[in-house]
């Protein structure tokens, strides 16, 4: 069905009205732009009075935590920022132009320059070339800022650690006589993982310095679940296992030594994992690192305990300086026993080794048992003292803090 003549007429009228309004709008915008930019000097700060100053409001919101590298002492974050100020030279009569706000080119006007003081790498993410200009001359300019900053982290209570990283925005081009900074902040965050959480983001302005400065403190908290499950709990279980190896009869010294050597080798793997997780030059040695070194020391003491028992059991037939030779025999590092031992089964070899170890000191088994028991209780005493020291340090009675941490 072809459209009738009245229908075509209405379409033509509507299109003409639409394009007429568009030309009228463009005409108002063009006239306003010409009026605002005529004689405007973008190099001069817009102050109504020489004794007056301009209020510049900076709003900071944490957008994303990209990375927190404890080993390299670096923090990578993305901030969303809003900058507000007013320029009386760019105001207009709203009723005259029927425009409340417009998009205005940022490069054609005076704008405040704030610089981030401490940063390893700063990258301004793509931002708009236009700002929002209101009829009263106030302006809003926003964007995203990616920051990689160097921070000194307090890893003393790792993995239950809390950190504070500071950022400073400074107005190098304008002094306190020209600008007055106002800072606000919020901690809205989109986390990439659950390892870190933001407890607070506080920004404050200091206009008493020659060049005004805004200081933002970002407080972070470490989620310890993963480290506890993969490092702390296994280390405690290995210490419990070592404790039970010492309860084995000293006549089964071969089995005890084998278990203790296995625990030492396994614990060395945990130390390697820990060394890749914490800073190599931390101002405060983490309690977890102290715990691992202490556990390693206790494992070595437990091993020495068993060696002393072996040496004491053979004291009547061997001088002290052949302890190493005796260890080789106990650990089956060399052939031992009389002729025909190679044809016996594993049970006979084990019995033969035990008989070789204690055959010359069966009469002194009670004294060996006494030495073994005494060394065990000395071990327990040291373990209790260590637990007391760790608890005292953990409660903060022996604090260790860096300059920027609480």
Image (tube, rainbow, N blue to C red):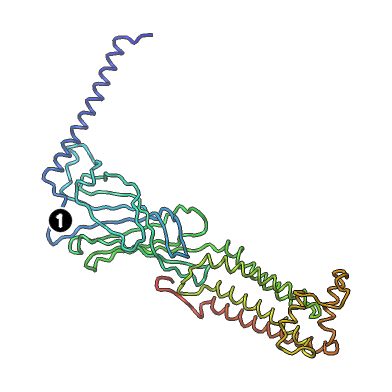
Q: Is residue 111 above or below residue 276?
A: above
- Between 255 and 328, the one lying in front of the other is 328
Q: Is 94 left or right of 378, judged from the image as shown?
A: left
* Secondary structure found at label 1: loop
Question: Percent position (x, y) of residue 157?
Answer: 52, 71
Instruction: List the residue tagged with mark 1.
Output: 47
The extreme front residue here reads: 339
Number of callouts in the render?
1
Q: Is 256 left or right of 404, judged from the image as shown?
A: right
Residue depicted at x 57% and y 64%: 227
Q: Image quadrant for the C terminus?
A: bottom left
Residue depicted at x 12% and y 58%: 49
Q: Image quadrant for the N terminus?
A: top left
Q: Is 241 left or right of 170, judged from the image as shown?
A: right
Q: Is residue 125 above or below residue 242?
A: above
The extreme left residue here reads: 39
Question: Percent position (x, y) of residue 265?
Answer: 66, 70
Q: Is residue 172 above or below residue 263?
A: above
Residue 301, quarter of the rendered image: bottom right
Residue 95, quarter of the rendered image: top left
Question: Percent position (x, y) of residue 175?
Answer: 20, 63
């Amino acid at each position: 069905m072809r459209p009738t003549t009245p229908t075509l007429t209405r379409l033509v009228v509507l299109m003409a009205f639409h394009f007429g309004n568009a030309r009228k709008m463009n005409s108002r915008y063009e006239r306003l732009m010409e009026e605002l930019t005529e004689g405007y000097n973008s190099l001069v700060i817009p102050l109504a009075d020489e004794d007056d100053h301009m209020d510049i409001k900076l709003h900071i919101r944490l957008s994303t935590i990209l990375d927190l590298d404890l080993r390299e002492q670096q923090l990578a974050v993305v901030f969303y920022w809003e900058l507000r100020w007013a320029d009386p030279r760019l105001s207009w009569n709203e009723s005259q132009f029927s425009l409340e706000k417009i998009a205005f080119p940022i490069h054609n006007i005076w704008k405040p320059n704030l610089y981030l003081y401490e940063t390893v790498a700063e990258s301004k993410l793509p931002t708009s070339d236009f700002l929002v200009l209101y009829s009263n001359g106030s302006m809003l300019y926003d964007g995203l800022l990616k920051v990689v900053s160097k921070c000194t982290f307090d890893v003393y209570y790792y993995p239950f650690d809390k950190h504070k990283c500071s950022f400073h925005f400074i107005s190098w081009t304008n002094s306190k006589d020209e600008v007055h900074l106002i800072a606000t902040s919020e901690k809205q965050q989109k986390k990439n993982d659950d390892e870190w959480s933001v407890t607070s983001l506080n920004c404050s302005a200091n206009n008493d310095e020659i060049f005004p400065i805004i200081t933002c403190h970002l407080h972070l908290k470490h989620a310890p679940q993963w480290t506890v499950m993969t490092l702390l709990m296994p280390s405690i279980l290995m210490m419990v296992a070592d404790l039970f190896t010492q309860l084995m009869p000293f006549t089964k010294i071969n089995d005890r030594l084998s278990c203790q050597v296995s625990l030492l080798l396994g614990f060395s793997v945990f130390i390697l994992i820990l060394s890749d997780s914490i800073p190599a030059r931390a101002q405060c040695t983490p309690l977890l690192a102290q715990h691992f070194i202490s556990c390693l020391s206790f494992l070595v003491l437990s091993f020495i305990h068993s060696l002393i028992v072996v040496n004491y059991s053979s004291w009547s037939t061997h001088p002290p300086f052949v302890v190493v030779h005796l260890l080789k025999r106990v650990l089956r590092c060399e052939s031992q026993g009389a002729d025909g031992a190679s044809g016996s089964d594993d049970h006979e070899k084990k019995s033969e080794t035990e008989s070789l170890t204690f055959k010359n000191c069966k009469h002194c088994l009670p004294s060996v048992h006494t030495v073994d028991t005494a060394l065990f209780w000395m071990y327990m005493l040291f373990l209790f003292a260590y637990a007391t020291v760790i608890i005292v340090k953990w409660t903060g009675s022996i604090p260790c803090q860096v300059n920027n941490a609480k």
